[in-house]
Image (cartoon, helix red, strand yellow):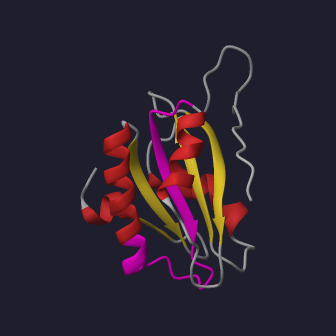
Amino acid sequence: MYEIRIVRERRPKYRSPRTVRDAPAVAAAFREHFEPLDREHFVVVVLDGKNRILGFNVVSVGSLTTALVHPREIFKAAILSNAAALILVHNHPSGDPTPSAEDRAITERLRQVGELVGIRVLDHVVLGDEGHFVSLAEQEGWR
């Protein structure tokens, strides 16, 4: 069982938390955490109404080729942190960030759940090696 870690990321006094503006920023923020991993890790990044990072939660640690993800686990972290939106991030240990059919299916399911509960899924970023990544929001045009 994974513990939900809501990390309030604050900059020096009187500054707001980091704002996520695009997929390259998300990829850059998580690249160093994912590169050494030999199994898929699926993370949800929770955001406030201005797309500032409230925290993140490791939802699933899988195998070389898959990580089981359920909407309940994704939205548990988002609801507990009073998130307005979220970004999904996971790695492909093979190094090829091309989204699988399963990646696309779970992303669509999570977007539907997000609409129901009022928490938007802004993107799903799949990380590969050497800084390569794919943004499903950009690739599928739902931005």
Q: Quadrant of residue 27?
A: bottom right
Magenta stretch, residue numbers = 82-104
Left or right, 74 with respect to 110, comes to: right
Q: Is residue 98 magenta?
A: yes
Q: Position of residue 115 (x, y in %)?
A: 31, 43
What residue do we see at 53% from left, 36% from top?
A: 79
Please identify the residue farthest to the top as the structure is shown: 14
Classify 120 as above or below 129: above
Work out whether residue 111 or residue 93 is closer to the camera in this orientation and state it: 111
Instruction: Count how many numbered circles sit on residues in the image.
Output: 0
- Residue at 53% in and 65% down: 69
Query: Image quadrant of residue 10?
Result: top right
- Please give the name of the residue rendered at 50% of the width and 56% of the height, measured from the top-left corner: 88
Could you tell whether 41 is left or right of 90 in the image? Answer: right
Q: Is residue 128 visible?
A: yes
In the displayed structure, 78 sits above or below 25; it is above
Residue 133 lies, in percent from the top left, at 49, 68
Quarter of the picture holding the N terminus: bottom right
Whether residue 99 can be seen here: no
On the image, the x and y values in percent for residue 42 come to 59, 64
Q: Is residue 8 left or right of residue 54?
A: right
The foreground one among 129 and 41 is 41
The one nearer the camera, 105 or 124, is: 105
Q: Is residue 46 magenta?
A: no
Identify the residue at horizontal 60%, vertical 23% (top origin). 16
Q: In x, y percent, where is residue 141?
A: 24, 59
